[in-house]
Amino acid sequence: MLSPPAARFAGLVAVQLVALSVGFFVVDRQRLPLVWAGCIAAAVVPWIVVCRAVLTGTRAPSLVQVLAAGVALRALAAFAPVGVLSDDIWRYVWEGRVQLQGHNPFLEAPAELAEVGTGDPVWQRLNNPETPAAYPPVGQLFLRLVASTGGGATTFRLAFLVCDLATMFLLAAWLARTGRRPALACFHALCPLVVAELCAEGHNDALAIMLMVACFAVFGRSPQARNAVAAGVLLGLAGAAKFLPLVVLPWLVRRDRRVAVPCVLAFVASYIPFWHGFERVPEMFEGLVQYGARWRHNDSIFAAVIGATEWLQGQLRWLARFEAQRLSKLPLALFFVLATVWIFRREREPSHAFVLLLVPVFALAPTLHPWYVCWVVPFLAVKPLPAHFALIALVSLSYHVLARFHHGDGVWQEDPWLKLAGYVPFYGLLVFSALRARVSPVAPPPTH
């Protein structure tokens, strides 16, 4: 018979399993995206209750219980339909397969390889076929490895699910090594947004997050030389899977300078398999440039800035010759640099700094898909910032565009009121925290 704390924990996890099961297997997530967002929000509530219990040590579950529940949630995700909310998974399959055929996805867009896709149903489901690969080289090499198994979308989803499962265990190891409660791994293990986006939909962010958490687990609190080198290599590989992890390099270097060179070498070396000479270097980043210049979805501050930019272009003719979206990014880039300097001066702990850095990243981003928010989840275990919890609960509202796009007139049109509903709690909690003159109203995790 279960003890009262264990029974309470089992009940909370059961609520999550039911909410996610309804979302995965009952609700048509494309036709009823707001119902899906409601399922995520319903699963977030018990997650927050568990996280708070572990933080305070009140009726908290054990590490074994947390990991078992995390495995159960991921087992559920493994059977969910894949590629429903995002078509990124088909792009992963394609880029993995064309590498096996000797093509370079950085230099050859899918539209240039139409003859390769003849008879391949994956090619018909690709997004933006005119754009070459934007994912960095470690991500590409991982796609090639998975493609070599001969599997399709389900296999790729499983590969990223395994990465996320590894993150859960690595997080527990990192927490234990730094004197925190390993059960704080519940922040990642039980987060419904992570289960939905990284495990069910199979987004490749799972690989980079795993490598970044591994970096922190190796780095520990007082790294020896070999650990500092290993942490640098892991951070370089994480940055070569997704660029975002590189923002914490200055903090790690301040703690131990031996991290810098291995990080840079690992990052640069990852491009060697795709190297085609100095003259083609600009082409290597063409996909990334196009993504930065064209993509826009679920933005908040950026929407206001681009509106102001377009108004100014109407008043000042010489500004009209510049593309509004690119021009709008200049003041935001400057603001991010200033925010980074401010955080660097006031926060010395790298993992804490990353949680704070993600505030301007999320606020200023022209594109904020729900799976982008998963980046903050493991690090909330060491610095729980309330505003991020609100964003995790509500960011799935951004899927409201899918109903009209897929089953209406094909227009990708955001509802400003739903966008407000998704962001007002986030910014409200940021203001509240600032007024209270502290980052988080929650006590820091107990240490041993």
Image (cartoon, rainbow, N blue to C red):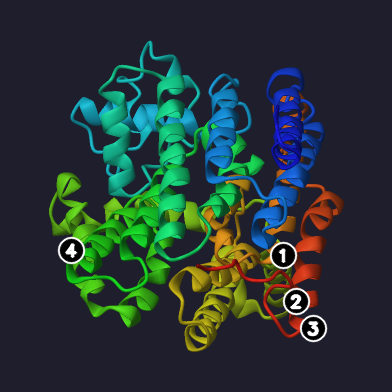
For label 4, the residue is 265
Instruction: Kindly identify the amino acid type of the residue bearing the numbered disc 3.
Output: Leu
Q: Residue 211: x percent and y percent?
A: 36, 51
Contact (CB < 8 A) between labels 3 and 2? yes
Contact (CB < 8 A) between labels 4 and 2? no
Q: Name the residue rendered at 69%, 38% in the picture.
A: 6
Q: Residue 64: x percent and y percent?
A: 53, 39
For label 2, the residue is 433
Disc on the earlier residue, 4 or 2: 4
Instruction: Kindly identify the amino acid type of the residue bearing the numbered disc 4.
Output: Leu
Q: Residue 205: x percent and y percent?
A: 46, 46
10 Å neighbourhood of mark 1: few (<14), some, or many (≥20)?
some
Instruction: Kindly identify the amino acid type of the residue bearing the numbered disc 2.
Output: Ser
Q: Secondary structure at mark 2?
A: helix
Question: Where is 122 relative to 360, above or below?
Answer: above
Is residue 437 in sight in this rendering?
A: yes
User: Marks 1/3: CA distance?
Assistant: 14 Å
For label 1, the residue is 386
Disc on the earlier residue, 1 or 3: 1
